[in-house]
Amino acid sequence: MPSLTLPYAEPYNPAPPPTEELDYVDLPVLDFSKTSTPKGWATLAEIAKNAMATQGFLTVINHGYTAAQTKRMFDIANIPFDHVPPEEKGRYVSNMKETGSYQGYKLPQLFHIENGVYDRKEQYSINFDVEKRSHPEALRPFLPEIEAFGKFCHFHIVHPILKLLAQGLQLPEETFVDMHDYNAVGESSIRFIKYYTRPEEEEIKTKNVWLKGHTDIGSVSVLFSQPVAGLQILSPEGHWQWARYVPNGLVINIGDMLQFLSNGFYKATVHRVVQPPPSQGGLARLGLFFFSMPDDSIVLRPVQGSPVLEKMRKEKIPSHEDNEGENAAPTAEMWRKARTASYGFVDLKKEGNVETEVINGIVVKHYN
């Protein structure tokens, strides 16, 4: 009989929230405790539809993953950074530019931010299939828990959101869920990220930006809220606002792929990471994420049969379906490989505070 004792993980003790009165964004809230009744579900569908059609972000509470489970996952998330020697990390680095995949380590000092300053972000990404590749020795005892975490996020967080968003387009609830098969070939992943502090001269050169404003590649991104401030969201009015810490809450946003599938109705909203406020100065920022993507074979053209999207098409919103030849709608695999291989590696065209590149005929913007 297998042991019920979990392997020891050194506790990760999060910092207290910032004391400053920051300009926080007011995100709509999805209370998953209301999903059990038709009335509650209908209410949540309307909230999700309006949130993702305007801000592209929302908060989820009462999602079923306990505070103790979340604390345990943050303990595990810190292991690849603080408990793996540098020489061992080097053996598990992802070759993003060649493979178009984030699986494995992305080490600091790789992405250029501005004025010769490179990022101080370290991350470790793990596929649904935790056995898809090998992992550092310190992380191996925790793979069953990591796999269970990914499965929970997929079925109990992402799937309900996809159903709510399909309902918002007056489509069958399973429309987007069917594009996210747990057993299909794809690149959905658990990701641990740690931002390290930088010298003051680098903060000045980058205007305190740690990660440029960008949209996510996939369909639904799940961030487990943590107290060190840094995430900022670009409002529809063009203002950067801070994301508020919600104990055991989730910050959810839409990525490129769902924007394409919804013909732009659901917004892949621009967000960035900046230096924490003074009350949290000198603190590293540990993040726990789940990035969901459609199956690799899904073609990223607008879904059919939605009365909401049919009305939009009359307004002629540009999408991949307007392109032909090499710029025709890509598959999910093509898009995530192209964006992953280019991010931080290609020269961007500067237009004021916006830097652009063209991928599959679509202009991709980065904000500094």
Image (cartoon, rainbow, N blue to C red):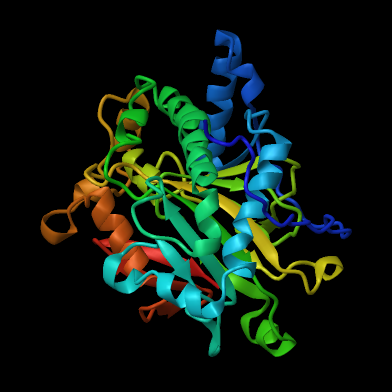
Question: Residue 179 at x, y = what percent?
Answer: 30, 34
Q: What residue is at 10 percent from the left and 57 percent from the top?
A: 325
Q: Is residue 34 left or right of residue 68?
A: left
Q: Is residue 24 left or right of residue 109?
A: right
Q: How many marks?
A: 0
Q: Nearer the viewer, residue 229 or 78?
A: 78
Q: Is residue 247 left or right of residue 129?
A: right
Note whether 172 is above or below 299 in the view shown: above
Q: Is residue 356 left or right of residue 67?
A: left
Task: Specify the farthest residue to the left.
Answer: 325
Note whether 8 is above or below 157 in the view shown: below
Task: Specify the farthest residue to the top.
Answer: 38
Question: Residue 116 at x, y = what percent?
Answer: 53, 90
Question: Residue 99 at x, y = what percent?
Answer: 28, 66
Q: What residue is at 78 percent from the left and 56 percent from the top?
A: 13
Q: What residue is at 51 percent from the left and 38 percent from the top?
A: 148
